[in-house]
Image (cartoon, rainbow, N blue to C red):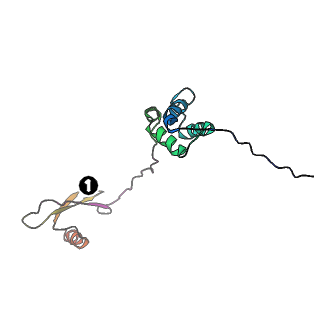
């Protein structure tokens, strides 16, 4: 008794010459057969009928360059974390510090401005600084 051998059924496909790649993609993607189905479905349709080296990248590039697809696709929204207020209950509990510069050098040698804002009272202070090193900023805050 002979063992059963499964035979694979291969579908015959046409080797697509370079001069017919664009017309075939136009018909299968833009034409009535394709209806702008997207990259993966277009690739499946093309691969079911044709074979060519680098066909997947050619389909990808064609679909990416399609103006109709670009107009129809909605831009993907990036998920954003919800914003929650951080309350402050007394002055100087939380302050916001920002450094502006480099600016033109003053006659005292300062090139930066450090702004400090109290989130409770909304009071603003500004300090002229020669540089933006941590020691310089800490000294300006300590003197205030």
Task: Name which quarter of the figure residue 122 lies in.
Answer: bottom left
**Point 55% across, 26% down: residue:** 32
Q: Is residue 77 magenta?
A: no
Magenta segment's dominant SS is loop
Toward the right, the furthest residue is 1
Residue 34 location in percent, x, y?
56, 31
**Point 60% across, 36% down: residue:** 45
State the residue in front, 21 or 101.
Answer: 21
Neighbour class for label 1 at 10 Å: few (<14), some, many (≥20)? Answer: few
Task: Look at the picture and state if 39 lies above or below 122.
Answer: above
Query: Which span is picked out in magenta?
Result: 78-105
Residue 20 location in percent, x, y?
51, 34
Toward the top, the furthest residue is 32
State the residue in front, 71 or 75.
Answer: 71
Residue 24 location in percent, x, y?
53, 33
Task: Look at the picture and state if 131 lies above or below 42.
Answer: below
Residue 69 location in percent, x, y?
47, 34
Position of 60 with respect to 9 (left or right) is left
Residue at which label 1 appears:
122
Task: Name which quarter of the figure residue 134 lies in.
Answer: bottom left
The quadrant of the picture occupied by the C terminus is: bottom left
Task: Look at the picture and state if 90 lies above or below 31.
Answer: below
Position of 52 with respect to 106 (left or right) is right
Q: Is residue 91 magenta?
A: yes
Toward the left, the furthest residue is 107
What is the tally of numbered marks visible in this picture?
1
**Point 29% across, 63% down: residue:** 92
Position of 105 with respect to 142 (left or right) is left
Mark 1, secondary structure of its residue: loop
Task: Look at the picture and state if 94 lies above or below 61.
Answer: below
């Amino acid at each position: 008794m002979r063992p059963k051998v499964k035979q694979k059924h291969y579908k015959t496909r046409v080797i697509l010459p370079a001069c017919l790649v664009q017309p075939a993609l136009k018909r299968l993607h833009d034409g009535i057969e394709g209806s702008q189905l997207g990259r993966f479905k277009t690739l499946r349709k093309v691969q079911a009928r044709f074979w060519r080296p680098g066909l997947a990248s050619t389909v990808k590039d064609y679909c990416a360059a399609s103006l109709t697809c670009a107009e129809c696709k909605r831009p993907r929204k990036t998920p954003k974390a919800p914003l929650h207020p951080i309350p402050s209950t007394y002055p100087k509990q939380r302050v916001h510090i920002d450094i502006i510069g480099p600016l033109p050098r003053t006659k005292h040698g300062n090139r930066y401005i450090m702004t400090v804002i109290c989130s409770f009272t909304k009071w603003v202070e500004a300090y002229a600084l020669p540089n933006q090193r941590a020691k310089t900023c800490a000294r300006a805050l300590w003197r205030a």
